[in-house]
Image (spheres, rainbow, N blue to C red):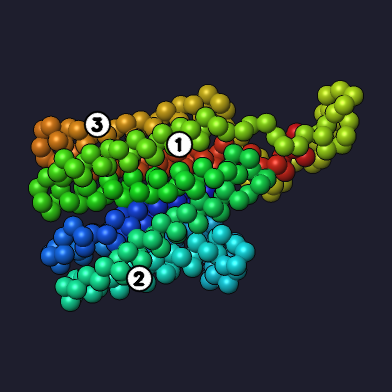
């Protein structure tokens, strides 16, 4: 599949934003007396990343001005459900944040609802791809699981960095949780790569019924030049380049942030180390998400090869 920059940006930054919003939904249990500035910065970054990603996703549409119409198909479309859930999450999260910031009254049930809706939004994003039977690489439950785990890991890393900025140090418990979540997320992604199914469900032999008498191949290409399907669905990346990008994604998105967290704990100056950890993690996630689309093979391409 042809990787769309707007969708890559959306899934990475909105995922991290909703992950941070999930954590803030339970933050009342940790500190009900947080300062206005603390809450404003935390919620501001969570909302900014979530909304920026959602806005960028509309650039992938042929008519972005009609994006609102997708919300009406929530009964049958995961894309529509994602949009509805995202709006509900932002509305509940906004009310929760305003009550906490201006009236110093964090309503715990509203925060819990915000957290649950944030998780459901990310799950719906993953299900957009997991329910496409024509793309075998995506069509499995592990796809939304990976989206959810990366969202939580990115949100925890952001929370850790912001906590260090306000309190001078991240704390051994929070930093340990962040490292464990990063390791779990990348372990799930490694298993996702490991269990991928590259064999096509249909081949020219099975489609024509001629496979029993020998190898079947196309005699002539169906088109003399590339068409829309070949450009959008037939994007190819060499295995050698894919392997390098996979290592780059793991290195930047998983290994480097863990190392930087450990350096922050060992040498102090937590904010600088953790800010670097957030940046390299997001870069690694951009590489991972680009590869997520680039490696996907749509079943329609069996018609052209």
The answer to whether 290 appears left or right of 41 in the picture is right
Q: Which residue is mark 3?
A: 259
Q: Secondary structure at mark 1?
A: helix
Q: Is residue 275 above or below residue 115?
A: above
Kindly report the distance in space between the C-alpha atoms of the residues bearing marks 2 and 3: 36 Å
> How many residues crowd around disc 3 within 10 Å: few (fewer than 14), some, or many (20 or more)?
some
Q: Quadrant of residue 302?
A: top right
Kindly report the distance in space between the C-alpha atoms of the residues bearing marks 1 and 3: 19 Å
Q: Earlier in the sequence, mark 2 or mark 1?
A: 2
Q: Secondary structure at mark 2?
A: helix
> How many residues crowd around disc 2 within 10 Å: few (fewer than 14), some, or many (20 or more)?
many
The answer to whether 7 appears left or right of 100 in the picture is right
Q: How many labels were placed on the picture?
A: 3
Residue 100 in sight:
yes
Where residue 217 sits: x, y (%)? 82, 29
Please tell me which residue is depicted at 57% across the width and 28% down the height of the picture.
238
Where residue 207 sits: x, y (%)? 83, 38
Q: Which residue is mark 2?
A: 92
Please tell me which residue is depicted at 9% across the width and 47% down the height of the picture.
168
**Residue 189: mark:** 1
Q: Earlier in the sequence, mark 1 or mark 3?
A: 1
Q: Quadrant of the C terminus?
A: top right
> How many residues crowd around disc 1 within 10 Å: few (fewer than 14), some, or many (20 or more)?
many
Kindly report the distance in space between the C-alpha atoms of the residues bearing marks 2 and 1: 31 Å
The answer to whether 83 appears left or right of 75 in the picture is left
């Amino acid at each position: 599949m042809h990787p769309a920059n707007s969708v890559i940006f959306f899934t990475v930054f909105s995922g991290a934003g909703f992950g941070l919003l999930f954590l803030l939904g339970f933050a009342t249990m940790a500190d009900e007396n947080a300062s206005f500035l603390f809450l404003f910065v935390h919620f501001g970054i969570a909302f900014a990343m979530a909304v920026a990603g959602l806005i960028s996703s509309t650039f992938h549409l042929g008519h972005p001005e009609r994006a609102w119409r997708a919300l009406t198909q929530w009964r049958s479309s995961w894309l529509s459900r994602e949009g509805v859930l995202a709006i509900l999450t932002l509305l509940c999260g906004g009310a929760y944040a305003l009550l906490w910031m201006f009236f110093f009254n964090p309503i715990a049930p509203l925060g819990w609802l915000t957290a649950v809706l944030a998780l459901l939004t990310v799950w719906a994003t993953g299900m957009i791809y997991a329910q496409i039977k024509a793309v075998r690489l995506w069509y499995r439950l592990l796809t939304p699981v990976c989206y959810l785990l990366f969202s939580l890991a990115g949100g925890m890393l952001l929370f850790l960095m912001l906590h260090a900025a306000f309190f001078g140090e991240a704390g051994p418990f929070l930093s340990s949780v962040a490292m464990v979540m990063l390791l779990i997320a990348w372990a799930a992604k490694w298993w996702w790569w490991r269990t991928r199914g590259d064999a096509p469900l249909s081949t020219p032999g099975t489609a024509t019924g001629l496979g029993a008498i020998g190898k079947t191949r196309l005699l002539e290409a169906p088109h003399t030049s590339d068409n829309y399907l070949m450009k959008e669905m037939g994007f190819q990346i060499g295995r050698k380049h894919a392997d390098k990008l996979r290592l780059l994604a793991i290195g930047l998105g998983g290994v480097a942030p863990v190392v930087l967290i450990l350096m922050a704990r060992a040498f102090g100056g937590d904010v600088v180390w953790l800010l670097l950890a957030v940046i390299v993690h997001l870069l690694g996630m951009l590489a991972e998400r680009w590869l997520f689309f680039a490696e996907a093979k749509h079943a329609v391409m069996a018609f052209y090869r």
